[in-house]
Amino acid sequence: MGMTSIEKILAGHSNRREVKPGDVVVVDVDVAVFFDWMRPDVVRIADPDRLVLLHDHQVPAPTIAAANNARQMREFVEKFGVKNYFPVGAHGICHVLVAQEGFALPGKILANADSHTCSSGALNCLARGVGPSEMTYILCKGQTWFMVGPTTRVNLEGELPQRVYPRDVIHFIPGHYGDFAGRNLEWHGDGLTNIAMDGRLTMATISAELSAEFSLFPYDSVLEAYLQGRAKWPFEPVSPDPDAHYDQVIDIDLSSLEPQVVLPGKVAWNSRPVREVAGQKIDQAFIGSCANGRLSDFAIAAEIVKGRQVAPGTRFIVTPGSQAILLEAVRAGYVETLMQAGAVVTSSTCGACYGGHMGLLADEEVCITASTRNFQGRMGSPKAKVFMGSPATVAASAVSGVITDPRDL
Amino acid sequence: MASTFKGRVWKFGDDINTDLIIPGFALYLAPDEQPRHCFSANRPGWVNEMQRGDVLVAGRNFGVGSARPIGDVLLRLGISGIVAESFNGLGLRNCINVGLPVLPCKGIVDAFEEGDIAEVNWTTGAVHNLTKGTTLQGQPVPKALQDIVAAGGVEAVLRKEGYLASR
């Protein structure tokens, strides 16, 4: 029987001719990513050249403990001779950096102790978030285990309407199909040609919120162009066998979609068209994270707020995915436009998204965010409420002071 | 490690996420300080009511969310095992890889009231409600993963093989 793209990568990395749902495989991990700190008690490691080390959740260090952790990471870099290290100044959110710097590549397996590692699935790279203990195991042994799950094939056709974005697509799906716990997602269809890399990275990132095991996009001309001059290593793209088995197929006509928000608390079965919650007062609007801190997100936000002002009583915070993106956004004039409108543009960090620093919510406050999670307590007080929307929905809401369908502005 | 765990049941719903188990503000506390904030947002005071050896019973998609070490925190609290309708893949990994037994089991939520005593064989999948005298059958994780749990998690393996400095 033929294999899906995901099954092929798992088979290739476990020295098997074939894998099928239900199998447990031990795979070689090609790239291991670490952020913010390294354990000091590791004696020997598998291969320093497969490591990428960087600072993102706590950068620049917001606490003394974080500063000490950062120092520990620099000591690790020195001790083991790690070449791929991004110090403060070259920093960025891990999933943004590994794509931007050409470490996440087609056909490879990438692991990182952060749940949104599936982001690199946009690059035809089998990438997964794992836990801290498991990451130590990968650091030492260069291997880990994966369970092969059944795969859902999502076929995207057509083109998104004005002011509807890939972020709306990845909100629509769990709203209509629930979670994908234990399952994989593979993205196919002609509609993909109309979705640029930034949008694919958003969709792959938010696949974590759908509880998918892996989320994989195909290697096509869009990805090929993106990797040109960027790829750090040789790579072999993967595509499914013609007779690959998908036990669920979802067909989506992109032209039929409208802007979607996810209501506070959870993602599965919790999406609504923006118009159904329009008028909900907000205290904070946020655009950033590994999901939406990219240049096109800045472009959308700047276009919407240009000539307008952030509504009185509302805070609008925008955080770039990397230093490089911030520099591009400055050069393109997006940062100036956002600041003139009254927005705060921060340094690159995961800060506000995980409720760490740079924009936490107070009790009873309401936020609309284009970041990664809407869980209770996620962005600050457990008494705050977090809605999720596309960067356009967030920017439109920021200038209105209430949740706003970007088509109505 | 024994192939069964037995204890008093605490019931939780669907989509129990990592941020409820380890709130963001607790993430950077010392490992032994994190557990007392477990479920503080959705069930304040629970950590004072629960006892070592208790069992978690949950609905669909248990452990959805981040890579936070949920298994480690639940082990420190003394939870002896988790039975859920289904698990998020990362949540499942973060229990197995630290040696916390888990069992996916359809129908578990309806089979138990809070406070019932559960006896669970996580290797065969047999679940007994000792309070009601009923049984049901779960879907145990594959043998290779049971072996990781039985070994006490992946760090125990690394320590044994000399990858980590001795404490």
Image (cartoon, grey):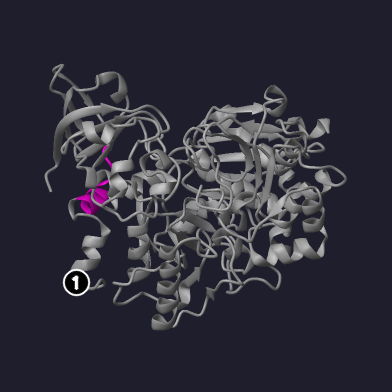
Q: Nearer the viewer, residue B61 or B67?
A: B67
How many labels were placed on the picture?
1
Question: How far across and down, in percent of the image, does residue A100 sit?
Answer: 64, 65
* Residue at x 80%, y 56% (from the top left corner): A334
Read off the chain for label 1: B
Quarter where residue A96 is shown:
bottom right
Q: Is residue A20 visible?
A: no
Quarter where residue B124 is shown:
top left
Question: How far across and down, in percent of the image, does residue B36 sit?
Answer: 29, 42
- Does residue B143 show up magenta in the picture? yes
Give the residue type at disc 1. Answer: Ser
Above or below, comparing residue A161 to residue A126 in the picture: above
Above or below, comparing residue B97 to residue A253 in the picture: below
Q: Secondary structure at mark 1?
A: loop
* Residue at x 67%, y 29% (from the top left corner): A281
Q: Along the horizontal axis of the image, is A330 left or right of B39?
A: right
Mark 1 lies on residue: B166
- Does residue B112 show up magenta in the picture? no
Q: Which residues are magenta?
A: B140-149
Q: Along the horizontal axis of the image, is A71 left or right of A339?
A: left
* Residue at x 51%, y 47% (from the top left corner): A355
Above or below, comparing residue A292 to residue A181 in the picture: below
Q: Nearer the viewer, residue A238 or A47?
A: A47
